[in-house]
Image: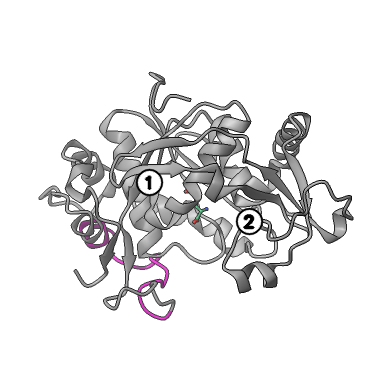
Amino acid sequence: MTQGATALPYVGRFAPSPTGPLHAGSLLAAVASWLDAARVSGQWLLRIEDVDSARSRDQWRESFRSDLARFGLRPARAPALQSQRNSFYEAAIEQLGAKHLLFRCACTRRELAAEGEPCCLRDCRGRALDPRESALRVDLTAIPPMTVQDRSLGAIVFDPRVHRDVVIRRRDGIITYQLAVVVDDALQGVTDVVRGADLLASTAWQIALQHALDLPALKYLHLPVLTERDGGKLAKSRHAASVSEVEVIPALQQTLRWLRQDWPTLETTQPDEWLRRAALSWDPTRFAGIAAVAIDD
Ligand code: GLU
C-alpha cells in the first residue's frame, strides 16, 4: 500500500457522533476539515456516525446540520447516516470472512479494561464460540507492517505484533467505529481525513483494515485536541457545552487562533464569505507537531 498514491480530487469529511452537542472541540474539527477542503476547491462531506445506537440521540443527530449551517459549513451532498448503512458493513465482514481473517473472542470488556489491553487476551482464535456471547475480531497478524505520514504529527505506524486484532462487531451485534469509518470513507470516495489527534491511536487499525479490505490509502491530518488548562478533557459543564448559541464570527476567530492561523479582518456577520477568505491563508504547517491546545491559550 503506498501512501497518498492517489491523484483523485480532494474529498474531505466531518464525521461527528451524535452522543452530545456540537462543542468547541468538534467545531474545531469541522472548521479545519472544511478549510482544508476549501483551500484546494475540494468537496466536504458530513457523515453522522450513529452506528452505536445505544449512545446516539435523535436530538443531536438533527441539530448537527443546522448548527454547522449557522457557521457557514454546508456539505456538498446530503449527510450519510451510519445507522442506515449496515448492509455495507456486513458486506465488508463477508469479505474479511472469505479471507479467513475473522475470529470470535469471548474476552469481556471488564477483563480487557483490567489488563489495559484492547486485543484478545486469551487465545480465542479457533474456538467455536456462541455469537451472542462473543465479539467478532479481525486477525491482523498477517498484515505487513505499514507506516503512514500524518501531515501534522508524522509517522503513524501499524505494527501487527502490537495491534494484533481489532473488534469489528461487538457481542451485542453493534458494528464498531473502526470498521464503519473505514468502509464509509472508501464508499464516500474520501481522500483526506482531517480530525482530532485523539483518534491517532485508531488510525493504525484503520490503515490495516483498509489493507485487509483492498481499499485505497487515505491522507491524514490530525488536529490538536482542545483540552482544559490542566491538560484534561473538555469538561461538559464548561467548554464542551453546545456552540448552538454562541456568536458565530468570534467563535470562528477563536477556532483559528487555537489552530495558529491568520483570519480575515472582514466586517461581516456572514460566515460563508469569512470562511472562504480564511481558506486562502489556511496553513496546517502552523500547528505541525502540536497534539493538544489548552482552551485558554
Ligand atoms: N465519529 C468520531 C468522533 O466523533 C470521529 C470519526 C473520524 O473523524 O474518523 O469522535
Question: Magenta segment range?
Answer: 237-253
Q: From where the camera sits, is residue 81 visible?
A: no
Q: What is the x, y in percent for residue 265? A: 10, 50
Occupied quadrant, residue 297: bottom left
Q: Secondary structure at mark 1?
A: loop
Question: Nearest the camera: 268 or 250?
Answer: 250
Question: Nearest the camera: 187 or 59?
Answer: 187
Q: Residue at x 73, y 42 (%)?
A: 86
Q: Residue at x 65, y 67 (%)?
A: 112
Q: Which badge, 1 or 2, comes first in the chain's sequence?
A: 1
Asked if the residue at label 1 sits under 8 Å from ligand 1, the reply is no
Occupied quadrant, residue 44: top left
Which amino acid is tagged 1? Answer: Leu
Q: From where the camera sits, is residue 176 visible?
A: yes
Identify the residue under disc 1: 73
Q: Secondary structure at mark 2?
A: loop
